[in-house]
Image (spheres, rainbow, N blue to C red):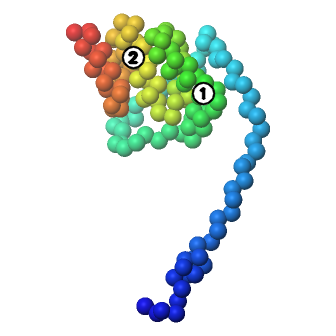
Amino acid sequence: MRSDIDVEELKEEAIEPVPEAQPELLPEPEPTPELELDAEPPSTETEPDEGPRKRGKAKVPKRELAESKSDECAALRDQAKAARNKGNWKQLLQLTERRSCWARASEAKALRMQALFELDRHQECITLGGGDKSREVSKWVTICQRALD
């Protein structure tokens, strides 16, 4: 090692100062209106099964993912969690009809299945969860099946 090189001087030269970040000013968000629970939900009809599915994470269409991040959907998810915590199962069923508000459809499905179980609608719970491989949904299928036995 050469003795004529000042190590501290090299460190100072190697580290460039980071410019101070300036906060970005955003417009004030508009208040989120309460969602109407009596409004008719979008159709939940599905396409016919096209054979076996590939393993791995299911991709959420970008449009649905963007919608799930909207303020309206965030409010809906908060209301659904509050309904679950209060044991308001009928309201939870209504709030989870719009699956596009969840980044993962299985999350909404599991909440619906819990509501169906609590309302003693065990066969509907099993039917809803049939074929879904997510851990949470599979758990509710098992719980609902045991309740029928």
| Residue tagged 2 | 114
- Mark 2 secondary-structure assignment: helix
Quarter of the picture containing the N terminus is bottom left
Residue shown at the point (64%, 68%) measured from the top left = 17
- Asked whether 17 or 47 is in front, the reply is 17
The outermost residue toward the top is: 120
**Label 2 to label 1: alpha-carbon separation:** 20 Å
Q: Amino acid at mark 1?
A: Cys
Within 10 Å of the Cα at label 2, are there few (<14), some (14-19), or many (20+) other Cα atoms? many
The outermost residue toward the left is: 149
Res. 145 in view: yes
Give left or right: position of 108 versus 136.
right
Residue shown at the point (58%, 22%) measured from the top left = 76
Whole-percent x and y of residue 118?
38, 10
Give left or right: position of 24 versus 122.
right
Residue shown at the point (73%, 48%) measured from the top left = 24
| Residue tagged 1 | 73
- Asked whether 69 or 128 is in front, the reply is 69
